[in-house]
Image (cartoon, helix red, strand yellow):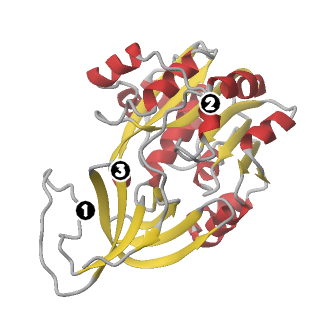
Amino acid sequence: MGDLSFSNGLSNGNGVHGNGHAVVSYSHRKSCWYEEEIEENLRWCFALNSILHTGATQFQEIQLLDTKPFGKALVIDGKLQSAETDEFIYHECLVHPPLLHHPNPKTVFIMGGGEGSTARELLRHKTVEKVVMCDIDEEVVDFCKSYLVVNREAFCDPRLELIINDARAELERREERYDVIVGDLADPIEGGPCYKLYTKSFYESIVKPRLNQDGIFVTQAGPAGIFSHTEVFTCIYNTLRQVFKYVVPYSAHIPSYADIWGWVMASDTPFVLTADELDLRMKQRIKGENQYLDGKTFTSASTLSKAVRKSLDSETHVYTEKSARFIYGHGTAYKHIQA
């Protein structure tokens, strides 16, 4: 749940992380804060310069915040989606591993991705001829086109086909196949619309049949921290193992998320590239340089900790509509005054 609050400044303005302690300082100025409830007894908050926009669409609530530690931040249904200073970590990790492992990716389908950042990273690949971005909420897409300057070039790229529809319905409707399908969806939250797009039946009957030979599917897979990875990360991984022969989980720390985040990549073709081979393909295929991801970084990202590996190996839960798992919260944004 994301709250906007106003206080007399009982904080250091740098969030809660420092050296693992909350550092408190005092100010006579009133400060505006964003607060998100990550777990029942854990909240994450940071100071704001201003609230640039707040509103609601047919499907969800939107806020654009100018934050002190993370720059402009997009919040949907009370959950921080991306922040200006570190969104490149999330989007480089989501996009580049599957495209680099594919021998010659030309066509890509994005489920979700209304913000435009996933399309931006995909369109940096010289081999890509067509990107279909399918998002259900036209107002969010229009909002991001207007406010997120960094993605304006991607939205104008003639290789991008923008579709406003439910991703499941659009994939079912289309006959063409794709080299890569990207799941840039909201987290599976109880009562939310996206959890059905993490199920075995969806992967098996809709996603896989829409992949070309050597095709790769990748999805964001929720929190993957030492305490949070069992929420949905391990069961998304195990669910994909039931459908694809080769499945690679990987993760990276994203400061604005206050956690390590996970992705899972899957294919019926093995992932065999070395760090040096990944670097070579980056140099040959990608326009410009990545800020975060290179071959060694991906090797590190896909080398998970002992505790997480143990959980992945022992996970037996398969994600279905009747046995879905969810991350914490419902995510309703609102304002309140805090003394």
Residue 9 falls in image quadrant: bottom left
- Foreground mark, 1 or 3, reads 3
Residue 154: x %, y % from top left: 67, 58
Q: In this view of the protein, which residue sits in the foreground, 243 or 291?
A: 243
Q: Which of pointers 2 and 1 lies earlier in the amino acid sequence?
A: 1
Q: In this view of the protein, which residue sits in the foreground, 149 or 243?
A: 243
Q: Is residue 242 left or right of residue 127?
A: left
Q: Is residue 337 above or below residue 244?
A: below
Amino acid type for the residue under numbered disc 2: Glu
Amino acid type for the residue under numbered disc 3: Ile
Residue 312 falls in image quadrant: top left
Residue 284: x %, y % from top left: 58, 36
- The residue beneath circle 2 is 321
Task: Tell me which residue sits at (29%, 35%) in the image.
Answer: 227
- The residue beneath circle 1 is 15
Task: Tell me which residue sits at (13%, 54%) in the image.
Answer: 21
Q: Residue furthest bottom?
A: 28
Amino acid type for the residue under numbered disc 1: Gly
Residue 321 falls in image quadrant: top right
Q: Is residue 55 above or below residue 91?
A: below
Q: How far is disc 2 from disc 3 in space, using C-alphas? A: 24 Å
Q: Are marks 1 and 3 in contact (CB under 8 Å)?
A: no
Q: How far is disc 1 from disc 3 in space, using C-alphas? A: 14 Å
Residue 174: x %, y % from top left: 85, 36
Secondary structure under the numbered disc 3 in the rendered image: strand
Secondary structure under the numbered disc 2 in the rendered image: loop
- The residue beneath circle 3 is 38
